[in-house]
Image: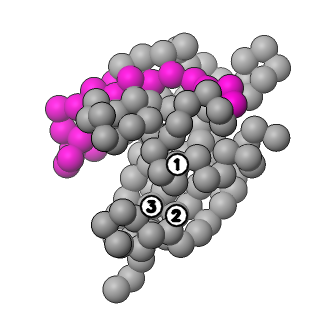
């Protein structure tokens, strides 16, 4: 079986000279605190997928994909293998916090995500796997 391609976005901003990363509280408690991410569609490249996912999941439009910072193979809790692509994304103008209803459909239909910023990898506990490359952002 081929790995499932996933695009992850570390959306960053500079706040008073300190890097912050955008995270969200999923309304289903077991889904925890996450970063924006999603499945790469057939025929879609991971760069385009991360842009689509950021727009669908956060509502943000004014951002720039800086670079791919990591790629790996990772085993999900259900045993499936994910080929994960982590991108660093810069945003210049975004609220301190906000609620957003994702527009991608599927399992996220009808959910509301609560977005906020963290300033270190110890601010919150991200769901398994989402914080794997925070050290590449918080240097």
Out of 42 and 16, give the one closest to the viewer: 16
Q: Position of residue 124 (x, y in %)?
A: 55, 30
Numbered disc 1: secondary structure: loop
| Residue 28 pos. (x, y %) | 26, 35
Query: Which residue lies under the disc numbered 1?
Result: 130
Q: Mark 2: which secondary structure?
A: strand
Front tag of 2 and 1: 1
Q: Is residue 124 left or right of residue 43?
A: right
Residue at the spot 44% in from the left edge and 30% down from the top edge: 24
Residue annotated with mark 2 = 84
* Disc 3 target residue: 6
Q: Is residue 69 above or below residue 134?
A: below
Residue 125 visible somewhere in the drawing: yes
Residue 28 placement, left or right of 54? left
Q: Position of residue 27 (x, y in %)?
A: 28, 30
Using the rendered view, name the quadrant where residue 72 is placed: bottom right
Q: Residue at x 67, y 45 (%)?
A: 134
Instruction: Measure the alpha-carbon separation of dots 2 and 1.
Output: 10 Å
Rendered location of residue 53, percent (x, y): 42, 46
């Amino acid at each position: 079986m081929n790995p499932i391609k996933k695009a992850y976005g570390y959306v960053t901003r500079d706040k008073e000279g300190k890097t912050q990363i955008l995270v969200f509280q999923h309304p289903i408690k077991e889904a925890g605190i996450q970063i924006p991410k999603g499945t790469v569609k057939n025929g879609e490249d991971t760069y385009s997928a991360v842009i689509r996912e950021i727009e669908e999941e956060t509502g943000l439009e004014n951002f720039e994909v800086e670079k791919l910072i990591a790629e790996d193979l990772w085993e999900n809790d259900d045993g499936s293998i994910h080929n994960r692509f982590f991108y660093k994304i810069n945003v210049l103008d975004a609220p301190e916090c906000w609620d957003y209803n994702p527009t991608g459909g599927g399992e996220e239909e009808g959910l509301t995500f609560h977005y906020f910023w963290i300033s270190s990898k110890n601010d919150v506990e991200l769901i398994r796997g989402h914080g794997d490359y925070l050290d590449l952002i918080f240097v």
